[in-house]
Image: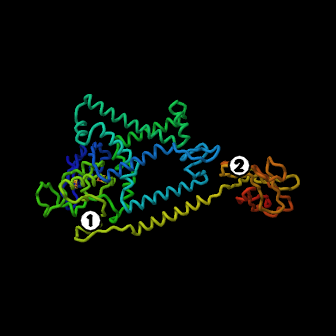
């Protein structure tokens, strides 16, 4: 039984066969039946190679993106003695994230949150202006799939040869091409998984330990997982990841409006389409010669001439494919090109098109990006290298000594983000009768020595004689002052007396 799609005012289109046992009475029922099918077997797509400015741009971007991903772990950055010299490092052991001159501590995870918000807003802005350029050029799924298709082409030839090879019975020639292709895919996938683990420890040490079998088990596990996912997602699943697994195509529906630039078939110029013989007039017809070169080039296996589709990743390869055809038939390039739905509609009604960067939503995104970016930069360049927290003992809350003095215990955590050791003087803002003692120091000695680039814990006792006790709790503040630079940090706390007992 045939599955049929029939939009109002359109011809019936046969999509495939209904599931076995489904009784079909009309087109709507057939469509209901098709909706119940949760899985559709993947039809292999054999995109044809194209040449043109967008293809070149994609090659350049791919080289930059892959080069950065594979090589960044090997870049060194001098942070001083005892500090890791890897420019980009996620150091889980010491709970640090290093990015060139930036070093983030766990307490500063809000920078990562800010970066994610910025990245999301940037993606919203770019999508509102240029549609799915992220999907078409920069998404890792697109970049690696593009690379895997290039390898496939190297071993199996271009579209027609690949189709022929897939249909041909197994032979020595087919076997070595398939084995060669999968072997190179595995090598790339392995390099991808291997590069990933280099971001989490010193790259040279990990590489050495990895090849000599001395790396941690987690390194091998992550290598295997990343190798497998790269091979599967870019090699065998490809466009299905974008169509079925990725939420972005759905989200973009809310972000793209009729004024966003997208890869567009300009039907106002292309229709009515039809075959064209050399020397024939172009009068009374469109420029599309129905050659389907755009369809053959599409890595998603769709026809851009059917309008905006969820599957279209805006890779722009159909633009290059169609431009090649337009040159051959001596018509202006750009039958498929970056354009807005509004422009196409305006031209079809006899008007002219235009494009503006300044729209309510793009201005809003830009303002938000500038505001959050400025806040983050300010925070980053004015961040203190000295901070502290005080943790009061809870069990017991307070101790009453034989002479009636009330004593509270504290753990003072002083963070020294500088790469040198430093000495700080501890002081107290409190009832003048309160006495402070640092365990391990001489009585009255309030100097604390801080290790470099570390969190330093100190045990303290605060004591209040009975004549000073006049409330259940008293606010206090600890202050540390760098004896050399004068930099200070403070934290508020309370002193419990148990007065209301
Ligand atoms: S490549 Fe251009 S001319 Fe050929 S079918 Fe596609 S839109 Fe029409
Ligand atoms: S229709 Fe064109 S832009 Fe969209 S995925 Fe296919 S080739 Fe890329």
Q: Which residue is mark 2?
A: 421
Name the foreground residue: 196 vs 23: 196
Quadrant of the rendered structure where residue 344 is?
bottom left
Residue 195 x/y as whole percent: 47, 41
Marks 1 and 2: which is nearer the front? 2
Q: Position of residue 196 (x, y in %)?
A: 48, 42
Residue 109 placement, left or right of 185: right
Q: Is residue 361 something that shows in the picture? A: yes
The quarter of the image holding the C terminus is bottom right
Is residue 141 something that shows in the picture? no
Q: Which residue is mark 1?
A: 344
Instruction: Indicate the position of residue 24 as horizontal and vertical percent values.
Output: 21, 50
Q: Secondary structure at mark 2?
A: loop
Q: Nearer the viewer, residue 438 or 373?
A: 373
Q: Residue at x 53, y 47 (%)?
A: 88
Circle 1 sits in a helix, a strand or a loop, which is it? helix
At x 47%, y 67%, the residue is 367
- 287 horizontally vs 263: left or right: left
Residue sitting nearer the eye, 123 or 36: 123
Sequence-wise, the earlier of marks 1 and 2 is: 1
Name the outermost residue toward the right. 403
Residue 9, x across and y down, in percent: 19, 62
Distance between mark 1 and mark 2 Cα atoms:
66 Å
Q: Quadrant of residue 463?
A: bottom right
> Is residue 47 shown left or right of residue 203?
left
> Is 66 or 215 nearer to us in this picture?
66
Residues at circles 1 and 2 in contact by the CB criterion of under 8 Å: no
């Amino acid at each position: 039984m045939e599955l049929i799609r029939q939009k109002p005012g359109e011809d019936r289109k046969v999509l495939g066969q209904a599931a076995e046992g489904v009784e079909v009475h009309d087109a709507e029922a057939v469509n209901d039946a098709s909706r119940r099918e949760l899985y559709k077997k993947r039809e292999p797509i054999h995109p044809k190679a194209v040449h043109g400015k967008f293809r070149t741009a994609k090659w350049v971007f791919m080289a930059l993106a892959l080069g950065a991903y594979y090589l960044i772990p090997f870049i060194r950055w001098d942070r001083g003695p005892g500090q890791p010299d890897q420019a980009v490092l996620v150091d889980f052991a010491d709970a640090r994230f290093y990015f060139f001159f930036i070093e983030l501590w766990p307490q500063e995870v809000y920078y990562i949150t800010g970066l994610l918000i910025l990245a999301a807003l940037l993606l919203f802005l770019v999508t509102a202006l240029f549609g799915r350029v992220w999907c078409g050029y920069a998404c890792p799924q697109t970049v690696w799939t593009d690379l895997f298709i290039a390898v496939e082409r190297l071993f199996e030839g271009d579209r027609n040869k690949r189709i022929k090879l897939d249909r041909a019975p197994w032979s020595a020639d087919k076997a070595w091409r398939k084995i060669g292709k999968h072997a190179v895919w595995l090598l790339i996938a392995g390099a991808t998984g291997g590069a990933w683990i280099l971001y989490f420890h010193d790259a040279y040490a990990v590489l050495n330990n990895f090849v000599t079998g001395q790396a941690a088990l987690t390194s091998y596990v992550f290598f295997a997982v990343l190798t497998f996912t790269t091979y599967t997602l870019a090699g065998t699943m490809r466009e299905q990841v974008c169509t079925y697994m990725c939420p972005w195509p759905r989200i973009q529906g809310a972000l793209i409006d009729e004024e966003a630039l997208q890869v567009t078939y300009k039907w106002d110029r292309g229709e009515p389409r039809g075959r064209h013989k050399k020397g024939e007039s172009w009068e009374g017809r469109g420029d599309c010669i129905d050659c389907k070169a755009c369809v053959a080039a599409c890595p998603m296996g769709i026809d851009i001439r059917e309008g905006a589709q969820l599957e279209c990743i805006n890779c722009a390869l159909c633009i290059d494919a169609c431009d090649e055809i337009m040159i051959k038939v001596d018509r202006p390039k750009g039958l498929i090109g970056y354009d807005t739905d509004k422009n196409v509609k305006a031209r079809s009604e006899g008007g002219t098109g235009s494009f503006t960067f300044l729209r309510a939503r793009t201005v809003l995104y830009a303002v938000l990006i500038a505001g959050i970016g400025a806040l983050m930069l300010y925070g980053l360049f004015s961040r203190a290298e000295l901070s502290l927290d005080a943790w009061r003992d809870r069990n017991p809350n307070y101790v009453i000594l034989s002479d009636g003095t009330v004593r509270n215990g504290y753990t003072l955590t002083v963070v020294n983000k500088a790469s040198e050791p430093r000495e700080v003087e501890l002081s107290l803002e409190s009832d003048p009768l309160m006495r402070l003692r640092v365990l391990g120091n001489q009585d009255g000695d309030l100097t604390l020595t801080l290790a470099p680039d570390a969190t330093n814990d100190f045990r303290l006792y605060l004591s209040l004689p009975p004549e000073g006790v006049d409330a259940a709790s008293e606010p206090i503040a600890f202050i540390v002052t760098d004896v050399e630079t004068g930099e200070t940090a403070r934290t508020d706390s309370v002193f419990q007396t148990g007065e209301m007992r």
